[in-house]
Every structure is written in structure tokens, then in C-alpha cells.
């Protein structure tokens, strides 16, 4: 029996029911007990004064790489969950490109157990679509779902075979799980290390054309239409993809999509100094793509923000651009970057951003959380929207340091993160307070 | 040491027109050194230079080595294979180890674009790119500029076409920057499969037919067609390439004026260029090679902190 917790006097934003007003939030027995102005504290309650701060459902990230099992030197489920908690996330979904691949119930169960042992942010496993992510034979979706998988994906390896993608979408319907795809036509993108355009031409780096993504977005939409299955498009990065998704949604096709904070804020010009922290897949695109992605996120054409947190060792990124791996970390900067650029930048309201980082992603993968309804699981975040902080890679809680936002001053960060009513992160009070 | 050119020379994109002219002007007095019976001046006596080649090269490496030796520098050649080990690690570790032996300059050739800049940002010694991936080959473009200036007495206002595989060519990129900064009009000609995206946005004229390029140009710089491109499907056959894009005597004879013919080498005779053209009266291909040594002497001299106005004196130094 844990102590009741009262979050007192904050701006409570719950996009799940369009709620946005100053109120108290009472948490008892791991659940939301009440949300109302002027709630009294029950006996023995832990009362937190959160005036000037925002109380919202905990953030949910549908796309992270936690590297365990296989590459624990750069991240583990525990360190990833710790970084997630510090970023305000109460739930994250771990992609299956581990070593060995998370393509069976035992592997899924391992992640569930490691997550429970860490006791921090919830880590939901995503199972592989195909055995060994080899793109040949379907994995056992049923058993993986039974062990705790919430979706399937061969992320990092695009599903090349349209037949396999079709059968995955059909087979997944039995278990009511989405099939998440990394959209990349491999023969077009082959050897590419950045976006194909003027910057890649100047730098003499091999580009990946936007069409390499859009061809597969188009294919996946057609297959979702054919099968009636739910396709979730990972890290959408081009304006052409946005157009395709908008049209598909207008036709009622079951497609959802995510976008990363970096694709919403950085262009291929970040590669100009051959900075390997600007190397990711899909690559950073052009200003017109950013504009289309922002508009799509606002309209809900793109459903949610996901970090694509991808830790890599210092040595791996300390290399010539061609030789460095793709990917950056993002859990601890996602909210700050999105809040600074999108909310303070006038693109989204704060309730809209919280919807795109909590309520909608929870709905897309059918996860608990994303709401402050009475009786719901108490996955809650207290956000301090006014705090200015500078991203210092040395102080990040992730095991890796590969962020393109190092040195950036951001406004807004998590102050307190609750999972099932338990505190999994609280910001250290500045000295002297 | 930071000089009139900065610490490193990794490309022409970031050089100003004045800096490029400075290099060309500094090269002039050094040309004569190579014509003497005793081809040596003491300008870089006591300096240590490492030629770090991660990619096979004959002409460029030898040209740099002659330039260094004729300036009296002490030189070491390191030929490292980039394939055996993680290239980035090898690169930075190799360079740091060399630097620990107290060297002054590194000349680097590397298969990855950006490798020279990567190295320059991590060591104190001056870094000179001898070609990085598909990015830039600054000293090649500088010697091309010097050769054009020798032949035509100017660069501004000339029309220069780069013919062939611009997509994979670091020589092309450096030439585009250098020529446009000095006021030449630049064209590119080749099949679309060998043209990078957005090339027109660099301010160049795009030709899809070699006949039109020849009609327009004063100078043709014919790029080497790497034969492995054919296997990668960029062109159907060498035979067809020569028929459609080859710089032949018949095509040149139809031009309204005599065109200066350049090639960075090594040539595929009968693939991108007709032997009668390569060896013809308007070819300056061997002058390019001669000028390569002088231009590289100028770059080394300036990066070592040599004062441009003293280049003449440095050249007289041995006398």
C-alpha cells in the first residue's frame, strides 16, 4: 500500500477528454483517483506543489532501440528506461533489432522481465515481423503477443517482399496489433548516407532520394487497403509521404504514422560539416519537408511524435561520415526539442503536443496510459514548460551520447514522472532552494 | 599554424577568389624550380610531412612528393588500406600517432568524403586533401586553373565544360568551385545517370549532348570514366559511351573554335577521349601534370606559413 500522492495546483492537461484547467490530481493505489480543483489531501498523502507546472498523462514513445540483448555497452533496458523516465516518458516500445533478434516469445518475455526488474518506464516489446528480420518467414505473432508484444516490425530492415508485408498485415489482424514499417526501397537507397539533394551533391556523399521512402509508403498503404490491416509508418520524413498518408486517411485506410523530433527540426544542412550526429535513417531532409511534417502533425495526418532513440558508441560515431552508423539518441531531448520548436515556435498548442506525445501514441498501439481519466493507470508526467536548460551530453542518463542537440538551449522538460503511481524520475532541485 | 589559407586545405568551396588567386600567383615562381639542374629550394627545410594515402594513387602522390622534396621538406609515405579495419578509427589513430612523432603537415587521400576535414578538426598539423571520396580534390582543380590561365592568359569569361562522370568525381566538384569563383562559366556534360542531383543549382550549364557542349565551350576537361561504373549499371557499355559522349577528333573539328583539351588522368583512351585528341596540338594534359608540382609547392609553402610576397625570394634561395 503506497502513500497517496496529490499533485496540487498545476495546469492539468488531459487531451483524452479535452481537459485543460488548473486542478489537483490525486493518485491512489497506482490509479488516478480524482482530478478536480481544490481537492483535499487524504491523511498521510505526499503533497507536491506543482503550481506553474503542467500535469499530463505520461509521454509514450512508440519507437526506441534499447540494444539489449546484444549491445549492452551502448544501452540496456534499464538505462534506456531511466533515460525515458527523465524525458517524461511513462511507456516506450522497444524495436526488435536486438542480437539475437526479438522474434519469438522467449525473447519478448526477456524484455518484459528486464523492464519489470528495472521498475522504471514501462518497456513494451515490439516483435519482429520475420524470423531473424530476414524478410522471409513470418515470426510467431500469436505467441509473441501472448508474451507481451504490442506490435510487430522489422524496423531498420525494410520489408522488401510485398507478399510478406501483405501476409503480415493479414495475420496481425487476428491479434489486433499494428504492423510497423521502416519505409525504404532498398535498391534506390542502397549505399546512401544522407538525403539526396543539393547538400549531398556538394559534400560528395551518396544520397537517398525521397522517392525511396515514398514508394514504400505508397505500397504499404495499398497493402493496408487490400488487407484491412493496420499499418503504422515509422519515422515519416518527406512531404511526399505526407501527401500519400493524407490521401489514404481520407479514404479511410487503416494507416497511422509517426515523426521524430529531429525530422521536425533539422535539415540536411546539418550534415554540412560531416557531423556524424546528423547521420540517421531516414535522413534529415529539406525545409519544405519540415514544413509539411509540422502541418501534418498539427492536422493529425501524422498521429504522433516518436524519438527513434538509437544509441551508438562514441567510437562508432567518431568516424568519417560514410563509415559511421545511422541514428541518434532522443529520449531525453524529445519533449524539450518539440516544445521549444513546435509549441514556442507557434506550430502546436501545448495540449496538442501532449496529445501527439501521449494520448495518440497510446491509442495507436492500444496501450494503457495516455489519459488522466479517473480509474486509469497513474502514468503521469509533470512538465516544467518554462525551464531553460542546455543539452549537455555528459549529463544524459542514456549510456550513449550521440545527440545532434548538444549545446542547444531548450525550454521545457519533465520535472516528475510517475509509472503506475510510483515516482520513476524527479528532477533534482537546484541547490539552495 | 593558421595562414593566409587557414590551417588546412580540404576544398575550394570555402576558399575566397583572392585565396585561390594567391595560390596560383605563388605557384608561378615555383614553376621555374623544376626547370633547374638542381631542383631544390630550402623553403621547407626542417619541416616534416606525411603523405597518408588510404587509396591507390600514383600521379598525385608522386606530384606531392616531388613538391615536398623540391622545397627540402622531410617526407614519409604511408600507404594504408582502408578496408581491413574500421576506417575512421584507423584514420584518427594513425594520424594521432604520427602527430605524436611531431610532424608538421599531413597530405591525405581517403575514399570517404569528408575524411580530410575530419582529420583536420582532430589534429594540430596542417592537413591538405589529396582527394576525399567524391567530395573535393582541391590541388587538382588548382593545377587545372593554373594550366587554363597559362594557356588563355585569363580564367574569367572562359567557358569550361566538365565532361563525363560528374556524379562520382571530386575533380569536378573542385573545378566547379574554383572556376566559378574566378569568373569562368562552367558547363557539365554527360548522361543524367552520371550527374548528381541539384548540380544546376551550383550555377553550371547542363549539356546532355556532347556536340552542344563542344559548340559552347572554350575548354573541355574530360573526366575519367571509371570502368566499374558500367558494372554498377550507370551506363550500358563502354562502346556506347564512346559513341555518344566520346571526345573525338571528328566532333572537335565541327567546333567553331579550337578547344583546349584537359584530362586529370589516368586516361582511358578510346573510352572518354580519342587518342588523336589527347595527343593533339590543343591538348594541355601534360602541362597539367607539370603544373601540379608547382601548385602543390605553393600550397605547402603557404600553409607552412610562407609569406606570399617572399615566394620569389624563396625560389631564389638556392642560388
Image: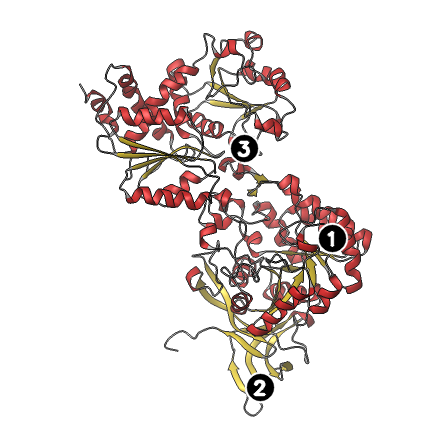
Q: Which chain hosts label 3? A: B
The reply, left or right, for residue B295 in relation to residue B281 is left
Q: Using the rendered image of the protein, determine whether residue A233 is visible from the camera's viewpoint.
A: no
Same chain for the residues under marks 2 and 3 in the image = no
Find residue A186 and report its image quarter. top right
The reply, left or right, for residue A377 in relation to residue A177 is left
Q: Which chain hosts label 1? A: A
Find residue B297 and report its image quarter. top left
Q: Name the residue under label 1.
A: A137
**On-image quarter of the C terminus of chain B:** top left
- What is the x, y in percent for residue A69? 57, 62
Residue at position x 49%, y 37% in the image: A203
Q: Which chain hosts label 2? A: A
Q: Is mark 2 on a helix, strand or loop?
A: loop
Q: Name the residue under label 2.
A: A2
Same chain for the residues under marks 2 and 1 in the image = yes
* Callouts 2 and 3 close, C-beta under 8 Å: no
Q: Which of marks 2 and 1 is nearer the N terminus?
A: 2
Q: How far apart are marks 2 and 3 (CA)?
A: 65 Å
- What is the x, y in percent for residue B293? 34, 22
Q: Mark 3 points at which residue?
A: B201
Between circles 2 and 1, the one closer to the viewer is 1
- What is the x, y in percent for residue A343? 56, 61
Amino acid at each position: 500500500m503506497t502513500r497517496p500522492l496529490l499533485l496540487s495546483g498545476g495546469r492539468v492537461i488531459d487531451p483524452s477528454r479535452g481537459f485543460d484547467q488548473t486542478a489537483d490530481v490525486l493518485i491512489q493505489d497506482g490509479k488516478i483517483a480524482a482530478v478536480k480543483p481544490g481537492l483535499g489531501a487524504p491523511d498521510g498523502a505526499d503533497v507536491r506543489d506543482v503550481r506553474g507546472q503542467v500535469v499530463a498523462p505520461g509521454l509514450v514513445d512508440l519507437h526506441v532501440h534499447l540494444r539489449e540483448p546484444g549491445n549492452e555497452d551502448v544501452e540496456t533496458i534499464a538505462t534506456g528506461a531511466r533515460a525515458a523516465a527523465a524525458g517524461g516518458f511513462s511507456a516506450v516500445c522497444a524495436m526488435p533489432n536486438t542480437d539475437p533478434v526479438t522474434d519469438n516469445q522467449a525473447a519478448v518475455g526477456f524484455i518484459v522481465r528486464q523492464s519489470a526488474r528495472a521498475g522504471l518506464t514501462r518497456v513494451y516489446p515490439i516483435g519482429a515481423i520475420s524470423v531473424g528480420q530476414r524478410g522471409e518467414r513470418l515470426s510467431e505473432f500469436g505467441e509473441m503477443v501472448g508474451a507481451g508484444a504490442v506490435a510487430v516490425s522489422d524496423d531498420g530492415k525494410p520489408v522488401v517482399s510485398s507478399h510478406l508485408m501483405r501476409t503480415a498485415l493479414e495475420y496481425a489482424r487476428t491479434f489486433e496489433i499494428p504492423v510497423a514499417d521502416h519505409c525504404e526501397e532498398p535498391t534506390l537507397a542502397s549505399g546512401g548516407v544522407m538525403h539526396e539533394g543539393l547538400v549531398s551533391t556538394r559534400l560528395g556523399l551518396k544520397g537517398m532520394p525521397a522517392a525511396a521512402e515514398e514508394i514504400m509508403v505508397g505500397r504499404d498503404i495499398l497493402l493496408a487497403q487490400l488487407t484491412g490491416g493496420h499499418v503504422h509508418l515509422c519515422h515519416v520524413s518527406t512531404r511526399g509521404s505526407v501527401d500519400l498518408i493524407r490521401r489514404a486517411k481520407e479514404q479511410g485506410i487503416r494507416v497511422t504514422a509517426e515523426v521524430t523530433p529531429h525530422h521536425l527540426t533539422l535539415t540536411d544542412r546539418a550534415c554540412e560539416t560531416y557531423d556524424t550526429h546528423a547521420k540517421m535513417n531516414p535522413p534529415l531532409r529539406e525545409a519544405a519537408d519540415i514544413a509539411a511534417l509540422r502541418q501534418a502533425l498539427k492536422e493529425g495526418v501524422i498521429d504522433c511524435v516518436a524519438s527513434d532513440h538509437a544509441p551508438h558508441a562514441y567510437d562508432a560515431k567518431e568516424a568519417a561520415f560514410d563509415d559511421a552508423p545511422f541514428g541518434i539518441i532522443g529520449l531525453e531531448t524529445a519533449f524539450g526539442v518539440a516544445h521549444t520548436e513546435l509549441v514556442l515556435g507557434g506550430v502546436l498548442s501545448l495540449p496538442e503536443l501532449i496529445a501527439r506525445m501521449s494520448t495518440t501514441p497510446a491509442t495507436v498501439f492500444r496501450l494503457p496510459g495516455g489519459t488522466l481519466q479517473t480509474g486509469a493507470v497513474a502514468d503521469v508526467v509533470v512538465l516544467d514548460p518554462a525551464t531553460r536548460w542546455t543539452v549537455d551530453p555528459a549529463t544524459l542518463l542514456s549510456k550513449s551520447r550521440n545527440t545532434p542537440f548538444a549545446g542547444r538551449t531548450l525550454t521545457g522538460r519533465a520535472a516528475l514522472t510517475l509509472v503506475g503511481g510510483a515516482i520513476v524520475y524527479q528532477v533534482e532541485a537546484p541547490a539552495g532552494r | 599554424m593558421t595562414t593566409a589559407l587557414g590551417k588546412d586545405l580540404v576544398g575550394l568551396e570555402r576558399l575566397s577568389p583572392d585565396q585561390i588567386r594567391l595560390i596560383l600567383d605563388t605557384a608561378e615562381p615555383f614553376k621555374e624550380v623544376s626547370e633547374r639542374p638542381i631542383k631544390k629550394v630550402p623553403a621547407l627545410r626542417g619541416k616534416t610531412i606525411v603523405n597518408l594515402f588510404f587509396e591507390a594513387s600514383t600521379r598525385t602522390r608522386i606530384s606531392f612528393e616531388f613538391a615536398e622534396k623540391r622545397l627540402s621538406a622531410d617526407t614519409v609515405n604511408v600507404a594504408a588500406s582502408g578496408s581491413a579495419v574500421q576506417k575512421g578509427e584507423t584514420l584518427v589513430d594513425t594520424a594521432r600517432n604520427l602527430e605524436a612523432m611531431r610532424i608538421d603537415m599531413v597530405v591525405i587521400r581517403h575514399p570517404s568524403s569528408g575524411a580530410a576535414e575530419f582529420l583536420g578538426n582532430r589534429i594540430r598539423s596542417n592537413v591538405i586533401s589529396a582527394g576525399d571520396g567524391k567530395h573535393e580534390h582541391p590541388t587538382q582543380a588548382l593545377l587545372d586553373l593554373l594550366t587554363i590561365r597559362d594557356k588563355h592568359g585569363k580564367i574569367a569569361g572562359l567557358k569550361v565544360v566538365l565532361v563525363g562522370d560528374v556524379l562520382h568525381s571530386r575533380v569536378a566538384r573542385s573545378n566547379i568551385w574554383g572556376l566559378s569563383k574566378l569568373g569562368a562559366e562552367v558547363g557539365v556534360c554527360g548522361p543524367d545517370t552520371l550527374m548528381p542531383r541539384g548540380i544546376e543549382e551550383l550555377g553550371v550549364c547542363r549539356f546532355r549532348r556532347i556536340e552542344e557542349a563542344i559548340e559552347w565551350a572554350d575548354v573541355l576537361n574530360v573526366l575519367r570514366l571509371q570502368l566499374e561504373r558500367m558494372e554498377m549499371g550507370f551506363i550500358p557499355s563502354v562502346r556506347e559511351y564512346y559513341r555518344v559522349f566520346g571526345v573525338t577528333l571528328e566532333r572537335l573539328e565541327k567546333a567553331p573554335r579550337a578547344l583546349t583539351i584537359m584530362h586529370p588522368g589516368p586516361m582511358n583512351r578510346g573510352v572518354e577521349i580519342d587518342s588523336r585528341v589527347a595527343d593533339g596540338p590543343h591538348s594541355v594534359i601534360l602541362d597539367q601534370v607539370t603544373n601540379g608540382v608547382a601548385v602543390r609547392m605553393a600550397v605547402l609553402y603557404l600553409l607552412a606559413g610562407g609569406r606570399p610576397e617572399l615566394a620569389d625570394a624563396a625560389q631564389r634561395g638556392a642560388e
